[in-house]
Amino acid sequence: MTWRIERGDCLDLLPAIPGESVDALITDPPYPGIRRPYGRLTDGAWHELMDEVVAQARRVLKPAGSAVFILQPNSEKVGKMRLWAWEFLLRTARRWNLVQDCYWWNHAAMPTVHCRRANGLLRPSVKLCLWFGRPDCYRDQDAVLWTPSGRVLAGRLEDRCLRRQPSGQSVRTGRTKAVVLERGGSTPLNLIPVANTDSVSSSARHGHPAGTPLRLCDWWVRYVCPPSGLVLDPFCGAGTIGVAAVQNGRSFVGFEKEGKYVEAARKRLEQASGKSVPQPLNSEWRPSRCT
């Protein structure tokens, strides 16, 4: 297991990665229309950036590899959504393949201007996890099984009666419990509930204003990257996806433009990996470190 952080624009650094050398690309990129210390992108500039990132992702990923882009739709104004996220979804899915529709639910999301009484809208709390790759791309469902519900565990193994639901679906309670016990958990839903709270694992604690929770990164790393595989994050920020990768025994390569976030990511990865890996911020690409 090795890790590497490069400082620079991902569009300059991605072409140096050898083709078909990466197992999974997992990233939470900047969003258009959001003012951050590192700038603000128009919708058009964002699409140009991401189209090139997608092209490079398809080149560097192994045949069974896949990419996950974590995106939160935003508004032009209250009551008028920007459409960039769905435009990106449709365009990329038609050119590549959308493996499954997946979402992250931040069930601890704070109230925003949208849900003030005068506006009457709902509290934004869901992000898209756009998962692109081949239909048969690598995934390990056993690595992300959920704790079974009390209702399932309370069922009797001997109960093999076929029960039909009002929807027309049928279930055998005993068989369901037997499978859960045999596998060690229940199959997860495509809505991943992870609270984005200010904990020691949050990028906000390391100076980054737009952090992704470590638990969510950990979940995706275990699900779409094989053991000892390589995870790439072209917008690594303070390195939370990298921390999840090395803590799970995967190698990691991250690109980041802002120097202060590069240093924060390096310190976090040194702590997560239990060892310091000295390397210059802009040294040339050495694929042997990541294979």
Image (cartoon, rainbow, N blue to C red):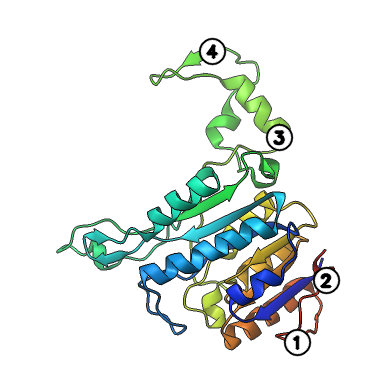
Residue 53 image point, x, y percent:
56, 64
Where residue 15 is drawn, which disc sits there?
none
Task: Please name which of the two marks, 3 or 1, marks the residue nearer to the observer.
Answer: 1
- The residue singled out by tag 4 in the image is 162
The residue positioned farthest toward the left in the image shown: 118
Locate residue 85: give its quadrant.
bottom left
Distance from Cα at disc 2 to Cα at disc 4: 54 Å
In front here: 255 or 53? 53
- The residue singled out by tag 1 in the image is 280
Residue 248 versus residue 261 in the image, above or below: above
> Which residue occupies 69% across, 80% down?
266
In front here: 149 or 281? 281
What amino acid is at disc 4? Answer: Leu
Mark 3 vs 4, N-terminal side: 4
Residue 118 versus residue 122 in the image, above or below: below
Of the 4 image quadrants, the one containing the N terminus is bottom right
Mark 1 vs 2, N-terminal side: 1
Task: Please name which of the two marks, 2 or 3, marks the residue nearer to the observer.
Answer: 2
